[in-house]
Image: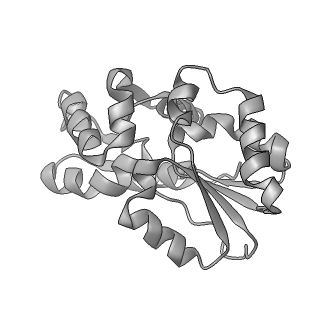
Amino acid sequence: MLKIVVYDSGYGGEVFADRLEEELPTIDVIRVIDWRHAEKIQANAKDARKYAEKALSPYINKVDLIIFANHLLTITSLKYFIQKYKDQRFTGLQLEHPCAFIERDMLALTTRAVFKTIKYHSFIHQLKMNTKTLVLESWPIKIDDGELSPTEIKDKMQRDVINYNFHPCGIIIACSQFSDIVPELKHIFGRNIKIYDGYRDAISSVYKLLHLKGYAGRKR
């Protein structure tokens, strides 16, 4: 049986692992969730790499694939791990580009650490569409602790998005924890809103790296 490690610092990793098990029920998904260092991992790319390397040391070169269910770690350190551990396969949650035919406004939800990276700003520049970014620094920990209420989500979206007459046709999620609040986001913006959380591309990468067949990219 294929063994895949899903690494993250919080509940976003659990959500991604659940979706991976739904897609590939015959694989062995090993969840390595570093709850203890969650705040440091989410706030600092250097710490994210350090704690990831320590937590993953028992699995490197012993499993078929390691997945970073963490946007910050993926965009800042994926190449580092691939180059350092050449016999181990890695992939992760990248910033997912919206469908090419979408030309209307996009809303991006992220954290300060991701927002500060050159790669994030390059990604937004390449979109060539009107994009509003919300930096939601406290939300990942609140989601991990079960303390982020639907009312707080709705009030934030009303105050910082809807009141500015900004009506997105899609939402880019650049923090895996935010995938847990997709139902609330769809309730606020409508069930037809497109969600781009990187999961689809990451699962597609799993199929490619493990030479599996059958995944065409399911949309949420």
Measured from the top left, where is residue 184 in percent x and y? 76, 37
Foreground residue among 210 and 7: 7
Residue 15, quarter of picture = top right
Q: Please state if 111 lies on the left or on the right of 1 as rendered.
A: right
Measured from the top left, where is residue 144 in percent x and y? 52, 24
Q: Is residue 157 above or below residue 41?
A: below
Residue 39, quarter of picture = top left
Foreground residue among 117 and 213: 117
Foreground residue among 35 and 153: 153
Q: Is residue 131 above or below residue 67?
A: below
Measured from the top left, where is residue 92 in percent x and y? 40, 49
Q: Is residue 57 visible?
A: yes
Q: Please state if 143 lies on the left or on the right of 169 as rendered.
A: left
Residue in view at x 83 percent, y 63 percent: 165
Q: How is the image coloured?
A: one colour
Which image quadrant: the N terminus? top left
Foreground residue among 128 and 149: 149
Number of marks? 0
Q: Is residue 48 above or below residue 135?
A: above
Measured from the top left, where is residue 176 in percent x and y? 52, 41
Residue in view at x 76 percent, y 72 percent: 104
Q: Please state if 180 lies on the left or on the right of 204 as rendered.
A: right
Q: Is residue 212 visible?
A: no
